[in-house]
Amino acid sequence: MDDRIIAFIAGLRAAGVRVSLAETEDAMKATAHMGVTDRNAFKTALKTTLIKERADEPIYETLFPLYFGSGGPPLLQPQDSLTPDQMEMLRAALRALAGDLGELLRKLSQGLAPSREELERIARQMGLDRPRRGQNQQWLTREMLRRLGMQDLLDQIERLLQQLAQMGMSAEGLQKMREILDANREALEGQVKQFVGQTLARQLSAQPPQKMDGQDLMHRPFNSLTESEARELRKQVSRLAARLRAKASLRQKHGKGPTLDAKRTIRANVRFGGVPFDIRHKRRHLKPKLAIICDVSTSMRQVVDFLLRLVYEMQDQIAKARSFAFIDHVEEISDEFTAGRPDVAVPKVLHQIPPGYYNTDLGSSLDQFTHDYFDSVDNRTTIIVVGDGRNNYNDPRLDRFEEIKRRARRLLWMNPEPVFEWGTGDSDMLQYAPLCDSVHQVSNLAELTAAVEHLFEGR
Amino acid sequence: MNSVNEVKDCLAEQQYIATDEIATVLFLADKLGKPVLAEGPAGVGKTELGKAWAAAAERELIRLQCYEGLDETKALYEWEYAKQLLYTQLLRDKLSDLLTGTQTLSQAADRLAGEEDVFFSERFLLPRPLLRAIHSDKPSLLLIDEIDRSDAEFEAFLLEVLSDFQVSVPELGTFKAKHHPLVVLTSNNTRELSEALKRRCVYIYIDYPTADAELRIVRLKVPDLNPALAKQAVELVQRLRRMDLKKQPSVSETLDWAKALLLLNAKSIDRQTLERTLTVLVKHESDVMRARRGLDRPAPSVEDDEDDGLDDLGPAIRRIPYPPRNK
């Protein structure tokens, strides 16, 4: 059983779940406590020690039956429900049809399933031991059943039943026979499905775990990422955030700094008769307060996705973050982010604001922002605009932009376009840029990280 | 407690309805001596689980509520300066007695140093929850609530305590736990917890209960409510949870609502009762509007549960005109 658990853990790792050695040990101990008789308890014991994240649960649920399956449902034995006479009749019928019936039906009618060796032989013929992309369990199961001779089975069952009827079996006996054969046919399907699943799972655990190296991806422009690369990179974000967080919190600590807060010190030490036991320092507000205004038109979605993820991961280093999305109008999306994790929230937001064709209107969005959401901006707020500044030849509303800048502490702009494209075509970037405190080009994750780091430097 | 069922029964005695999964996890946590990390949406009874377990295991409950800025002096221990000061003042005469007869300043300092244990003793140590759990003479249960609200540094500090169950106070030495406390950590998942912390815990995700389980909870906690009404109420709450709301009604809100229905002496959940009490369940203005609109539709039959139609309601409402732009 221990081997099976180890193989299962290797399978989990190969599927991208992080399982440490200590957790493996816990799993072993836990299963020793629970025993293996109660399948559900066993399953819970492994799950609670190995799976530490909700997102990994589906992987666990699919892999578990593959490693700890019973080998499929058992076949019914005809002698259990048929009388000896009827059994004799069945044997005679099988003999009579010797040439016409397939091997498969002969076995099923006697309650026998193809042996494991036989299944493995077929699997080898199908090349199941050399996995290829795009093979899925369903297709492989169907193919295997076909090779076992499943198609002719229904016809053959009818033939056998006819033969039995001719030989004078009672209607009740025939009914029983039919039930047995149908049940065994389904059981066989179940067994083959399990077999295929287990074989695939074994191959999965033999594969080395996915490499978590995204260094070169960090420098790849967002718009040239494939879907799988983007997924890989999203995993990087949390590690990146951990690094940034360490830096930011270190600054925070140093920031507690040496400036004495005389007022608070005196107030705190009144109870000691004015003897300053408890020294209070001036606390600087180092945690930035953010308002993020994101362009979520199609070209911008990758950047916005990554930025919002980073901000979510850094939430404990930020005093307050509100986020807004615009295409032709502004909508607040903060709630989506405080309620759920970015894996859920980002697709939800992007789904709610469907992109149109050439309808980006930054100018009127800024105008609407100053009308509806100006309460989110005060002299401690850092505003980040994420966008390419392409305004569809609409009025850029620089007056509104200046108004926002006057009210905020800092105004940052992150633009994924290369600098030489700014100001070309419908881009108003060059008009906005002089009004910003800093403008960052963020075409890849490395640049985005640098920009976010700058944000925490607090200058 | 020697079996999963026993855990379950004990929790039931404390009026906590545990699923098999929860009971198994608690049982294992006890056997392996590991903290339990319970995650899930707000109001599904994570904190309640800690309390019920403490009562079921007949242990003292020590609770540490986490918040931003929580640090060691609030969580572990603090020297009680005021008391030290007071003692020094009151013992001034004794101190001068002690120091009489000394010739030089350094002699006096040496003699005083011989007595300094008096001032740095456990007498002046103000134990905070973590130290109390470790130091307690009776077996205890430490409930660390909403760990995701604390800072990352505090989480790192907690690792040491949770893995060794010992704490060192520089002036006094190391305290080792007399009894291994049971530990329950809860998290609402507002931020990612560190891998290291998760590795040390057994993990459970507690989701909203199924309709049956929720009905059992309502029947248990609000026994006076008419059973038919309770069933209707739970069905409605479950329907609300399937809608695209900003904040979904939690179990505790279901219970509040059930109590409200009882107080209002409602015979059935009709339109008027619902209008009057909906705000107990749904706390956002926009959610109230959406819920009203959603509930006006006929209740979906059980068969097409999946295809509720209510799920699609969210985007539909968002597409309704936003305020006119003023150019």
Image (tube, grey):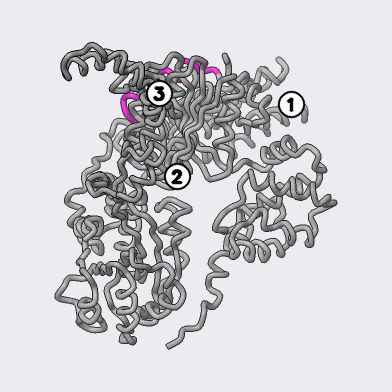
Residue topped by disc 1: A173
A67 vs A77, left or right, is left
Q: Are marks 1 and 2 in contact (CB under 8 Å)?
A: no
Q: Secondary structure at mark 2?
A: loop
Which chain hosts label 3? B
Q: Please say if B195 is above or below B83.
A: below
The boundaries of the magenta stretch are: A14-37
Q: Which mark is residue B189?
A: 2
Q: Residue at x 34, y 86 (%)?
A: A394
Q: Residue at x 29, y 47 (%)?
A: A281
1 or 3: mark nearer the eye: 3
Q: Is the N terminus of chain A in the top left, top right, bottom left or bottom right quadrant?
A: top left
Q: Residue at x 70, y 20 (%)?
A: A81
The amino acid at mark 3 is Leu
Q: Secondary structure at mark 3?
A: helix
Q: Check if residue B231 falls in the magenta segment.
A: no
Q: Are marks 1 and 3 in contact (CB under 8 Å)?
A: no
B271 vs A456, left or right, is right
1 or 2: mark nearer the eye: 2
Residue most extreme to the top? B101
In this view of the protein, which residue sits in the foreground, A448 or A74?
Answer: A448
The amino acid at mark 2 is Asn
